[in-house]
Image: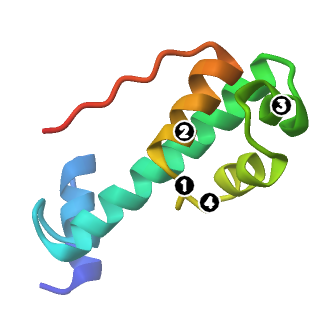
């Protein structure tokens, strides 16, 4: 069965992901899951900043970083230290960050 046939036959979101990116644990699926998580972080940051009625500059000042870091994070450049991410959410937005491993 081809990839397109598997996609068309998918009856759940998990089956669709399996068909498109491979099963959980495969290199392609792991990469997809990683990128999806990073995308969600950037969207949470943007959403939280907008709800707090802050500009990128204001958030940078509150969190002790600079506007370039905020902009890069919101635009998909995720290569920043975890400590900076904590500063942005904790100090800049008053949010508590929880980190879990599974």
Assign the C terminus to one quadrant of the image.
top left
Residue under label 4: 76
How far apart marks 2 and 1 lie (CA) works out to 7 Å
| First reached walking from the N terminus: tag 3 or tag 2 | 3
**Contact (Cβ within 8 Å) of mark 4 with mark 3:** no
Q: Secondary structure at mark 1?
A: loop
| First reached walking from the N terminus: tag 1 or tag 3 | 3
- Residue 86 vertical placement versus 3 (above, below): above
Residue under label 1: 80
Q: Position of residue 77 (x, y in %)?
A: 61, 62
How far apart marks 3 and 2 lie (CA) works out to 14 Å
Residue beneath the point at 54% across and 55% down:
80
Residue under label 2: 85
Give the camera-side residue of 9 and 71.
71
Q: How packed is label 1: few (under 14 Cα within 10 Å), some, or many (20 or more)?
A: few
| First reached walking from the N terminus: tag 4 or tag 2 | 4
Q: Secondary structure at mark 4?
A: loop
Residue under label 3: 61
| First reached walking from the N terminus: tag 4 or tag 3 | 3
């Amino acid at each position: 069965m081809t990839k397109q046939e598997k996609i068309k036959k998918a009856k759940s979101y998990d089956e669709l992901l399996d068909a498109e990116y491979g099963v959980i644990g495969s290199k392609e699926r792991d990469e997809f899951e990683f990128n999806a998580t990073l995308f969600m972080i950037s969207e949470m940051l943007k959403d939280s900043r907008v709800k707090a009625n802050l500009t990128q500059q204001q958030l940078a000042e509150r969190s002790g970083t600079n506007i370039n870091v905020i902009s890069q994070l919101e635009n998909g450049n995720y290569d920043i230290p975890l400590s900076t991410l904590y500063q942005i959410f904790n100090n800049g937005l008053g949010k508590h960050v929880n980190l879990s491993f599974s």
